[in-house]
Image: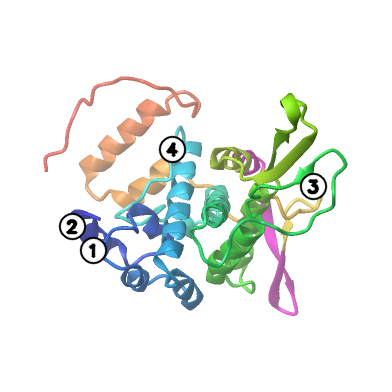
Amino acid sequence: MEQKDVDDFKELGTYSWHTVGLIDPTGKIRSHSEICQSLLDITADQRRICMRSQRVLTAISLGAKMGKEECQHHFRNNRWNCTSISNVIYGDVLSIKSRETAYIHAINSAALAWSVTRACSKGDLAECSCDNSIRRKPRKWQWGGCSEDINYGVMFSRKFIDSQESNTSIAGLMNLHNNEAGRRAIRSRMQRVCKCHGMSGSCSVRVCWRRLPSIRSVGEALGQLYDGASYVKLVERDGKASKLRRRDPELKKLIKSDLVYLDESPDYCEHLVSLEQEDDCAIELHMALMDAVYSVADEVTRLEYDILFSCDL
C-alpha cells in the first residue's frame, strides 16, 4: 500500500465495512488489525471476524470491492450510479430505504459470499476448503474435484453482514430480507462442471463438481429483481415489528428471494444537489448537466455538449 493510500484510508476509516473495498489490504504499511480497528461504524462481531487474519480481511475487502463494482455496472446509465460522496461509500443513499438500497444490500451480501467461497477453494482461509459434503449418488456421473463451498460463504456473509441489523426495526427487517435475497441469488446459480475420464475419450466416467457463477451474472439477476422489487409495509405483533408484507394485498405473497423496499426512490438529481452542492452557480451547472443527459423522457442519451458557463472558484 502506498503512503497516499494510507493517508486516504485514515480519512475513510470512520465508516462501514464497505470502506475496505477501497484499499489494498495486503499492503505492508498497516496490519489487518490496525485496519479493522480503524473501522468505527462496524459491530463488535464484525470487528472480531475482521481481525481473525490478514486473509480474512482480504476476502472481506474483495467482497466489498466486487459489490461496489457490480453496483456501478448495473446503475451505470442511471442518474444515481453508486457514487461515493465525501469518501462515504454509496453516499447518503443508504439512509433512504429505496430500491437502490435494496440492491446495494443484496449485491454486497452476494459478493461477500462469493469472495469468501472462492478464498476457501483456493486454500486461502484456514477454516474452510472444498465442499466435501455427502450428496446423493447420481446415475451417470460422480462427484469429485473441488466443489466450491458456497454454504460456508453464505454462512460467513450472514454472520458478518447481518450482525449490523436489528430484526425488531422496520429498516432492519428490510435490510435482512435483502441480504438474504442476495445470498439466495448466488446459491441458486451455482454451476455444475464436469470432466470426462476414460480410454480414447470414451467418457466412461464423468466427474463433476460445483463452481461459483460469475458475480456479473448474479448482479444481473439481482438487477431484474430490482426492477420488480416489492413495495412493502411493516406488520406489527404486540406492538413490535414482526414482518414485512406487500402494500398491495392483491399481489402474491412475498418470498425470500424478492427484493423489498419501504420508500419510493427520490429524484436523484435534486437529491444529490441537496447533498453535494451549496454554491448557487454550482447547483445551476449541476442541473444543466443533468438536463443535458436526461432530456428525453428520462431515457439515457449519450450527448456531446459544451459547458456554456463556469463557476468562479
Kindly check if marks 3 and 2 are in contact, taking CB atoms under 8 A apart as contact. no
Q: Are the residues tagged 1 and 4 within 8 Å (C-beta)?
A: no
Location of residue 145 in the rendering, given as x and y in whole percent from the top left corner: 66, 47
What's under tag 4, amino acid-wise?
Arg
Crowding near pointer 1: few (<14 within 10 Å), some, many (20+)? few
Q: Distance between the residues labelled 4 and 2?
A: 34 Å
Is disc 2 placed on a helix, strand or loop? helix
Q: Quote the CA–CA distance across marks 1 and 3.
A: 54 Å
- Asked whether residue 311 is in view, the answer is yes
Query: Which amino acid type corresponds to the residue marked 3 in the rendered image?
Result: Leu
Quarter where residue 244 is shown: bottom right
* Residue beneath the point at 67% across and 50% down: 187
The residue carrying mark 2 is: 3
The mark nearer the N terminus, 4 or 3, is 4
Which of the two residues, 168 or 110, is positioned nearer the viewer here? 110
State the image coordinates of residue 59 (x, y, percent, origin top left): 46, 57
Question: Where residue 24 appears, x then y in whole percent?
Answer: 32, 54
Circles 2 and 1: CB distance less than 8 Å? Answer: yes
For disc 3, the marked residue is 251
Label drawn at residue 300: none
For mark 1, give the secondary structure: loop
Q: What element carries label 3?
A: loop
Q: Residues within 10 Å of mark 4 (few under 14, many from 20)?
A: some
Secondary structure under the numbered disc 4 in the rendered image? loop
Magenta segment: does it hold 224? yes
Disc 1 residue type? Answer: Ile
Q: Which mark is residue 79?
A: 4
The Cα–Cα distance between marks 1 and 4, rounded to whole angstroms, is 38 Å
Q: Can residue 171 be seen in this view?
A: no
